[in-house]
Image (cartoon, rainbow, N blue to C red):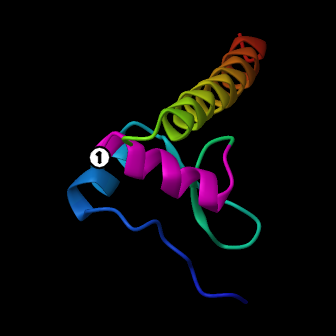
Amino acid sequence: MKPLQTLAISEALRAHLSSENLLALNSQGQEVLHGLDFEESQLLVDCSERPPPDASLQQRCAELIIKHERARLRIATVDDERTAAKF
């Protein structure tokens, strides 16, 4: 079993992301944001803490935000459908 690989973030940010159910563990035992791989997750966290000066990196971060939000919406939809099926 591989050791857990966590994102390089403050405990306060980790607590916030966890409370919002934004963090997940992937099959490699890496802490990630939903819908993103480990490197993408770290980049997005870095961009949120310190906006990148480079326009191409800003664009990449914007793309990752969209990718992450789409994944979150898919998860929410599946959960809602499962919950609705119970009633």
Amino acid carrying mark 1 in the image:
Glu
Q: Secondary structure at mark 1?
A: helix
Residue in the picture at 68% in, 55% down: 37
In the rendered image, the quadrant that contains the C terminus is top right
Most foreground residue, 38 or 59:
59
Crowd band around label 1 with a 10 angstrom C-alpha radius: few (<14), some (14–19), many (20+): few
Residue in the picture at 68% in, 30% down: 71
Q: How many marks?
A: 1
Residue in the picture at 39% in, 68% down: 8
Q: Main secondary structure of the magenta part?
A: helix
Image location (x, y in percent) of residue 63: 62, 29
Query: Is residue 1 visible in this depiction of the protein?
Result: yes
Query: Is residue 25 visible in this depiction of the protein?
Result: no
Residue 34 falls inside the magenta stretch: no
Examine the image and state in which quarter residue 56 appears.
top right
Apparent side of residue 80 relative to residue 32 in the rendered image (left or right): right
Residue in the picture at 55% in, 52% down: 41
Apparent side of residue 59 relative to residue 35 in the rendered image (left or right): left
In the rendered image, the quadrant that contains the N terminus is bottom right
Apparent side of residue 87 relative to residue 20 in the rendered image (left or right): right
Residue at mark 1: 49
Image location (x, y in percent) of residue 4: 56, 79
Chain part drawn in magenta: 36-51
